[in-house]
């Protein structure tokens, strides 16, 4: 997300960094480029105009004009204004109501509403330690009810069965009563979507909202719709007074205009952002962290939180002890590390949150390839337990068998074995307490493709 905007802003800041000092003229030139970048990112015109006006007001102040670091000053101003535009801080769900707290999910068909509901159920269960019941009031698509039943089973939450013969209000009321009977903390209710906003849809969602008085009414919008997403949010907010927005498909949106415009246009916060197809690919929306990503400053806090949630600490400690005892780091261990990377959103997901990644050439970034991880895992899975523990025994006929079993080539097997051998040597240095030796050894041999012969991720 924000790839295009990030590139344009990075260029503006780089050009300004070459200036000795800020002047009204070079500020004007820089802000013209920022304005163009915002409009090309599909940010609403009034939003872009107000954004630039606010920065210009601050940029012509005496302290700023006398600064010796114009690039850094502009980064700070743009960062603070982005945070202000998107809402200052994360606004969490209000779950303080007498249980069960009721969350109504609304949105157009195709926005990813039902999947997002399941992601939210999983998030509530795993990060908030809440018991959750989900129900579908979409009486027009029986498949939607079946889909939610399947997803509920996948994320291990309660599912309330409903039927197309019932009314949405009846379904919602019965689901809430079932949650009360089972002493469940949160009820998530899916609603019918339409291909476009119409009177019938608005009347139905209003009736449902009035009948159950939800604690939260979240609008799910597809970020790739750009300004249409903002228009949708405005119409729904006027109809049922939404409490927040969930932006979906953010990983496929290179522009990001919806994220920058919705809060300004509706006055409602973006509470969550969908960052992939996996059932755990939902993040609370933190304006300051998103602003840092836009400006290529990284998002280490989110990365650390993901590591806390997803990394298997017991396995990590076991591996450390094994290496300290001088035992060999083998391909079984390596496969475990690959799985840990998958759990954190893959190489691409990790790299997107590291500072300065936008400055890497495209040909280098293209080599941070999650498909390569899948290929490597397939190769290791095609080996016998003995081959994984003792890779040196993998010769001619064994290589041919592994290549056939993994759908790869002998060349790919050779490449993996060569690179794995380098990793084993590094691990031996760690075992001897030679962290500085390891760091020196890593120079030019980082395990990322194209940076010196390491792993071709």
Image: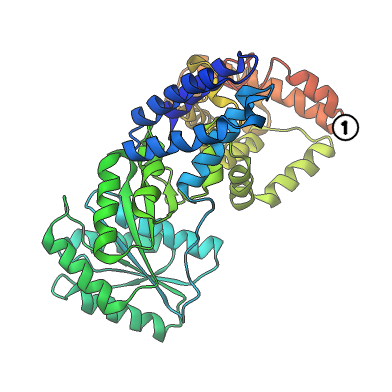
The image quadrant that residue 24 belongs to is top right
Q: Quadrant of the C terminus?
A: top right
Q: Which residue is found at the position 78% from the left and 24% from the top?
A: 439
How many numbered markers are drawn? 1
The answer to whether any part of residue 403 appears in the image is: no
Give neighbour class at mark 1: few <14, some 14-19, many 20+ (Cα, 10 Å).
few
Q: Which residue is found at the position 57% from the left and 38% from the top?
A: 341
Q: Quadrant of the N terminus?
A: top left
Name the foreground residue: 118 vs 61. 61
For this view, does 207 lie left or right of residue 331? left
**Where 65 falls versus 18 (above or below)?**
below
Q: Secondary structure at mark 1?
A: loop
For this view, does 157 lie left or right of residue 90? left
Name the foreground residue: 206 vs 339. 206
Q: What residue sits right under mark 1 in the picture?
A: 433
Residue 434 screen position, x and y as percent: 86, 28
For this view, does 383 lie left or right of residue 122? right
Residue 261 screen position, x and y as percent: 37, 43
Residue 227 screen position, x and y as percent: 28, 40
The image quadrant that residue 257 belongs to is top left
Q: Which residue is found at the position 11% from the left and 63% from the top?
A: 200
Q: Which residue is found at the position 45% from the left and 35% from the top?
A: 53
């Amino acid at each position: 997300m924000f790839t295009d905007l990030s590139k344009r802003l990075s260029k503006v800041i780089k050009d300004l960094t070459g200036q000795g000092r800020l002047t009204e003229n070079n500020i004007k030139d820089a802000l013209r480029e920022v304005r163009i970048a915002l409009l090309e990112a599909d940010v609403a015109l009034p939003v872009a105009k107000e954004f630039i006006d606010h920065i210009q007001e601050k940029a012509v102040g005496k302290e700023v004009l006398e600064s010796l670091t114009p690039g850094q000053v502009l980064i700070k101003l743009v960062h603070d204004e982005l945070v202000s535009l998107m809402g200052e801080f994360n606004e969490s769900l209000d779950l303080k109501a007498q249980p069960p707290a009721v969350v109504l999910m609304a949105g157009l068909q195709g926005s990813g509403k039902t999947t997002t509901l399941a992601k939210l159920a999983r998030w509530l269960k795993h990060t908030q330690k809440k018991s959750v019941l989900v129900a579908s009031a979409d009486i027009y698509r029986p498949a939607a009810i079946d889909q939610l039943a399947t997803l509920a089973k996948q994320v291990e939450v309660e599912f309330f069965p409903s039927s197309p013969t019932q009314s949405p209000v009846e379904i919602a009321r019965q689901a809430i009563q079932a949650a009360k009977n089972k002493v469940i903390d949160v009820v998530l209710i899916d609603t019918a979507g339409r291909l476009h906003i119409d009177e019938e849809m608005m009347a139905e969602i209003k009736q449902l909202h009035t009948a159950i008085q939800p604690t939260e009414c979240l609008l799910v919008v597809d970020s790739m719709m750009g300004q249409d997403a903002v228009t949708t949010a405005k119409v729904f907010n006027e109809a049922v007074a939404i409490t927040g927005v969930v932006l979906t498909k953010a990983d496929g949106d290179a522009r990001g205009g919806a994220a920058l415009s919705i809060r300004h246009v509706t006055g409602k916060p973006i509470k969550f952002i969908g960052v992939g197809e996996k059932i755990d690919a939902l993040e609370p929306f933190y304006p300051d962290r998103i602003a840092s990503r836009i400006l290529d400053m990284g998002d280490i806090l989110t990365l650390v939180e993901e590591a806390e949630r997803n990394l298997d600490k017991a396995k990590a400690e076991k591996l450390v002890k094994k290496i300290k005892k001088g035992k060999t780091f083998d391909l079984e261990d390596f496969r475990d590390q690959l799985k840990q990377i998958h759990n954190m959103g893959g190489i691409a997901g990790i790299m997107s949150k590291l500072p300065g990644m936008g400055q890497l050439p495209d040909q280098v970034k293209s080599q941070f390839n999650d498909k390569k991880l899948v290929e490597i895992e397939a190769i290791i899975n095609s080996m016998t337990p003995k081959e994984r523990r003792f890779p040196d025994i993998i010769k001619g006929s064994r290589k041919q068998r592994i290549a056939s079993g993994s759908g790869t080539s002998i060349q790919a097997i050779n490449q993996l074995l060569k690179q794995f051998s380098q990793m084993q040597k590094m691990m031996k240095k760690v075992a001897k307490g030679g962290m500085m030796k390891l760091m020196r050894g890593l120079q030019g041999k980082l395990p990322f493709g194209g940076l010196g012969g390491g792993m071709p991720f």
